[in-house]
Image: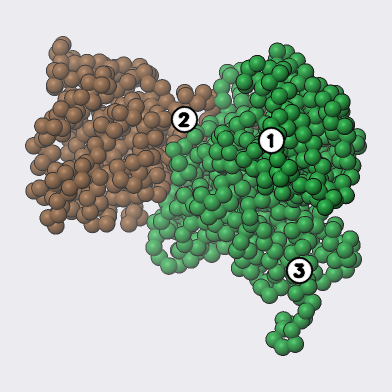
Amino acid sequence: MAAKRIESVNDFVVKFANVNGSGSASANTLFAKSIMRMGVPISPRNIFPSNIQGLPTWYEVRVSEQGWLGRRGGADLMVAMNPQTWDRDVAEIDPGGYLFYDSTKPLPASKFRDDITVIGMPLTAICNDAYSDARERQLFKNIIYVGALAALLGIEPDVIAELIGEQYRGKEKLLQPNVHALHMGYAYARDRLGGPIGLRVARSDAVGDRIFIEGNSAAALGCVYGGATVAAWYPLTPSSSMAEAFARHCRKFRVDPDSGRARYAIVQAEDELAAIGVVIGAGWNGARAFTATSGPGISLMQEFIGLAYFAEIPAVIFDVQRGGPSTGMPTRTQQSDVLACAYASHGDTKHPLLFPEDPKEAFEFAALSFDLAERLQTPVFVLSDLDIGMNERLCEPLEWDDARRYDRGKVMTYEMLESGQDFGRYLDTDGDGIPYRTYPGTHASKGAYFTRGTTRDAYARYSERGPDYLYNMERLMRKFATAANLVPQPIMRPAAQPTRRGVIYFGSTTPAMDEALDMLAKGGMHLDALRLRAYPFPKSVADFIAAHDEVFVVEQNRDAQLKTLLVNDAGVNPATLIPILHYDGTPITARFITDAVAAEVRRLNVRPLHGGRAA
Amino acid sequence: MTYLAKPKLHHPDLPQNRLGYTRRDYEGTVSTLCAGCGHDSISAAIIQAFFELAIPPHRVAKLSGIGCSSKTPTYFLGQSHGFNSVHGRMPSVLTGASLANRELVYLGVSGDGDSASIGLGQFAHAMRRGVNMVYIVENNGVYGLTKGQFSATADRGSKSKRGAVNTDSPIDLVGLALQLGASFVARSFSGDKAQLVPLIKAAVEHRGAAFIDVVSPCVAFNNHPGSTKSYDYVRAHNEAVNRLDFMPRRDEVTADYPPGSVVDVVMHDGSVMHLHKLAADYDPTDRVRAMNYLAERAARGEVVTGLLYVDARAEDLHYHLGTVDAPLNSLGERELCPGAAALREFNAALR
């Protein structure tokens, strides 16, 4: 059953199947970056277990000159380096695709497929001949296969050598052996494996000035730029690397040049309750503070989040979402904390959420979140996910305007108090629902107040009177309405042709959605698209929904959480909204979206004779 | 019920401290706790200590959790910002506040339920980190606000007002604080103001985590025969290891102490603690011996009070983190934002 060999230039997927802890990650990144350096866009994804050593791990590189950065699905070339997962890895190759494997140990014919091209290279034997040290044999094996793949795919070995040079700058002892291993693999594949295959990388200029960065690192840098000085966190995948990146960026950018001391404080707390407690204490005292966590941490922080909402204390919470519920799929991606964050805590609460689409927006929203938290005096959530946070992503360069000033919100200063200005901690003086606050220690006889989670009047005096409580709760609602206009507004992308159908999506769904919209349009299906960037929703969201007969709501969770939020808060007709849900833990793909939308459209077009939905 | 404002009637002859404040300036609203509550005596001791130290009231931040003890910050230091946080989580809020502005004095007030039961973890970790604070536990061994349940510091065998006997082992917060690395550890009794006020003053001047466990009888639910936290029981079993006179740096040392019974401890800022040693074999600068002493006396049913341990050269969390002298909450764009040029360089390294 021979299938036609896949032939493709700058448009294919290479998947590496490795054992974690084997040193494959840096070699695989090297492979991906070399293609980027040749001007061809890539989107790599780590698919890894919750484990340190010995379990299967995959690295998927999508090469797309057109610039599609979402996961595609399938694999055109499988680099099968893990015997444990051999069968499923071989099965995953698209018909006509390629299998690259270590042929040192012969495998029976039944272990292969006849509709793919098999390329065996005796990697272990080559390494055993070339190296005597066991660790070297393992590490250089990775570089050797990168060299071989370069020959097979037409990647310029000089580009890889240059990357190795950058990686080992100043460590010449490591540089030379790596370059040597690279060339060894390259020469072997060129001379002994029949040279290039049907998949090819050709130089292009499609990358432009884009950068390649993980969302967690970009978000952490946004915290540095946004003026965060206090961070408290508890290690939790996939958020830990954000706190660690903040520490790294601070060591670079936040050390007082004169004293050598830190303009920041980072506490690795004993749990998430303490982490959010530290953030709230710092926010109360006038410092910009944040925590980074994931779903289980959000669950633990609930009580404190309610306190910060009710006592009106700025706090920024990054939720790098993963697969839930419970421990769930800790190393897989989902958008399943939308409701848990929007309504976090007991009683009537609601909180602004920001939805970055990629590392660039993670940077921007991180910096913005501190302005919003202080302006609104409330916890603000930045909801990214594992797909954005823990994968390097090609995105536009980060930007900063030096004229930009932090918005510290309504803070009554010593001078204002001294001039006799009336200070009511929970008094709305101008109708936006936001009261003034004072920092502790401001004035010897004015402006002190008692912060508490219990009810109080506009002057922060304890009160259980109904009218005082209502004043406060209604003011908080006004404040939330104010928030809708301050948060990042949705981005509307009209279809090429007039249409009665629309789609709403957010966050890491974006790259797959971009591609799906293109695929659907080519197939004659035109959708107006609205990318939500924040909650609460401004009126334009309800207007968008009202302007369409059907609106697909694409999200990565089981329960259509964003749709629920839209129904609850945007006052829209629920029947208009059609959920498209992807939640198996893998990043959503354009193929999935187009298939699901097409299926829904077929269903809609078959109208029952009786009891059908109104047109 | 903390809204009762106290009338501001300043007698012209009220004594003033060094800064010209009277004791009234350190008071709060009228207490709404039960008459005779030990907590009110502690509030009075706090007022006295801060008045005598002449600390401007607004330069103090007072934080608490939930419970009778945690309500007390409204009854003192009315010109200080206060924060009544959530149950058992005051230590983390205080830690964050302290990180934001190292220049204020941080006073954490908690109870035995708040610190030894629901908040034991946060209590422990704040001590470990050496947060620069005074942490007072008003310890009555009982949940007052919810009407008389045992707390985790209740002694095994002690009887509740309704006659129930506690069968769980007690947590001794003093022993824990010593083990966890608190650098100032003391115990006192709400009914012993002469001992408590100097302890609070010394704790305020101490740099690092200063912990004072104050046994404070609950007149409503834990002051009956059979309770080991009643006035009568504590008076009968109190074994004070020392008496303290605290001399802030600015005061002239005038007192004359008989040699042999006094130990001077010099604090980081030059303040001096004169310890009148009552137990000849007690050395408050030896942590291991303090722990042993405490355990031995506890086995005999004695409640050891006094300054149990002090490390006058302790380092605090800010020191460990290497933070700048300026309060972090006072830094602006110029100190915090690396700017566009740095970002361009950052981008260039990612291509």
| Image chain in brown | B
Name the chain under label 2: B
Q: Report in which chain the residue with disc 3 lies.
A: A
Element assignment for label 1? loop
Secondary structure under tag 3 reads helix
Q: Quadrant of residue A170?
A: top right
Residue under label 1: A81
Residue B273 higher or lower than A401, as above or below = above
Compared to residue A178, the image places residue B76 above or below, namely below
* Amino acid type of the residue tagged 1 in the rendering: Met
The chain containing the residue under callout 1 comes to A
Q: Position of residue A608 (x, y in %)?
A: 74, 84
Task: From this view, report whether residue A175 is shown above or below residue A70.
Answer: above
Give a yes or no on whether discs 2 and 3 share a subunit.
no
Label annotation for residue A605: none
Q: Residue B272 in the image: x percent, y percent? A: 29, 18
Q: Nearer the viewer, residue A321 or B308?
A: A321
Q: Nearer the viewer, residue B59 or B37?
A: B37
